[in-house]
Image (tube, helix red, strand yellow):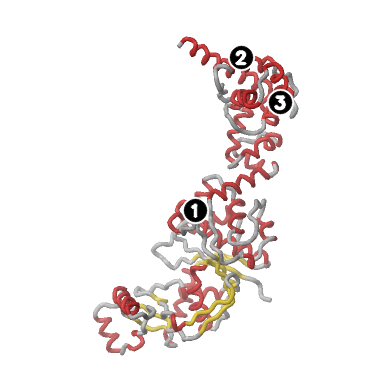
Amino acid sequence: MSTVRVRFAPSPTGRLHVGNARAALVNWLFARRAGGVFVLRFDDTDAERSRPEFVEAIREDLRWLGLTWDEEAFQSARADRHAEIVGRLTAEGRLYACYETSEELEYKRRRQRAMGRPPIYDRAGLSLSDDERARLEAEGRRPHWRLRLDHEDIRWDDLVRGPCHYDSAHLSDPVLVREDGTLLYTLPSVVDDIDMGITHVVRGEDHVVNTAVQIQLCRLLGGEPPAYAHLSLLTDAGGEGLSKRLGSLSLADLRADGLEPMAVNALLARLGTSDDIAPASNLASLVDGFDLSHFGRATPKFDPADLARLNARLLHAMPYETAQPRLRALRADGGAAFWEAIRGNLDRLADAGEWHAVAFGDIVPRARAAEDAGFLGTALEALPEEPWDGATWGAWTGALKAATGRKGKGLFMPLRLALTGLDHGPELAALLPLIGRSRAAGRLERAAAAAGSSRDHTKSV
């Protein structure tokens, strides 16, 4: 068998969004699972909108996901090859000139629909005489060029959708060359797929109709069509298309929001499959479990809330050795015991900075109510001597319960507010030894004083 070769072919006209990322990831996983080649090909033939900064942004986004590429190419660098094919198809009579304006074409389509006919181009351009073409060009019209399709039943076995076929007699001859001489997507894509030896094209189902044309064009050019797999398009949680929301679903925005790239990968790799969506610590584990046949035709829903939950689960299971370099960069590395204490409370890794300040920094203790002043004073007096360990919290609170009669929230919440300044967080049994006796005593003292001041103020009023 020949080596599997796939391509991810973004247009560098903007940042990658989750739909692009899913296509890139599925292609990458398919290639790596087969021991094949992943080609990054920039479809940059739109000179007006393509930008070098977007080329670099796309590279940055792929690197963030961990998707390396084996080859890189630019369609714009192959303009001479594309022009050669245009010349060949024109000489063979497969490309023909058409002079209708967009308004005239729309009028034809409306007329056909009114008569109950499909809005297919009538091939009027084929019947123009040389004199008629000369007259139209004398009027200032410039032709666009269409591919004359052979009317046949075009079939392929889609790796996701199963057997597919289109009768090309029901398709309009596609425009391959615009009036200004620039090329539409179809011709460069097919030519480059042939020349680059692409064996599989994995993309969204919005390209299904294009596939019939591309298969015929590939064969006209003497190529062997690749295998095709068309993935169902993502929708939002409510089933609406993502197109209107893609601005807020760019990889750059997800990265800025502090999400883990492997959370993004783990979700996108399984959306649209029957496989369970679960945290994955690395791409290798996704490669091992990848199977293109698991993708179905049901519409997958991309819900940012699912991504957030997956992100948290990934952090909760992350070993300290993996987190340590990044914690150090955040200036939040409190050691393995600190990580074990806090990781179960993280939604984003950056949240570790808040808990680092709680464990080792200077916080503002809080007192819940004036009546807690005496209790906090008693807690300070009962504070055990060091060394402290995981049993210290239980011993201390047990003694306080016996001395004060407090229990449940009335016992634990004043201590949490005083020691952390927050009403939620990691288990204090793990956090207390990190805070240490000196910091704990200072916080209890300040919290008791704050509660006492509140009580005195209430009495004076």
Three-letter code, disc 3 = Trp
Does residue 133 show up?
yes
Q: Position of residue 231 (x, y in %)?
A: 55, 66
Q: Is residue 113 left or right of residue 422?
A: left
Q: Closer to us: mark 2 or mark 1?
A: 2
Q: Mark 3 touching mark 2, by CB under 8 A?
A: no
Q: Nearer the viewer, residue 370 or 204?
A: 370
Q: Is residue 379 above or below residue 361?
A: above
Q: What is the x, y in percent for residue 30?
A: 63, 65
Real-space Cα separation, disc 2 to disc 1, in angstroms: 53 Å
Q: Which residue is mark 3?
A: 393
Residue under label 2, please give it. Answer: 374
Quarter of the image containing the N terminus?
A: bottom right
Q: Secondary structure at mark 3?
A: helix
Residue 321 against residue 407 in the figure, above or below: below
SS for callout 2: helix
Crowding at dot 1, Cα within 10 Å, few <14 / some 14-19 / many 20+, comes out as many
Q: Is residue 197 visible?
A: no
Residue 394 locus on image (x, y percent): 73, 26
Q: Amino acid at mark 2?
A: Gly
Disc 1 designates what residue? 250
Q: Residue shown at 65%/52% (left/top)?
A: 278
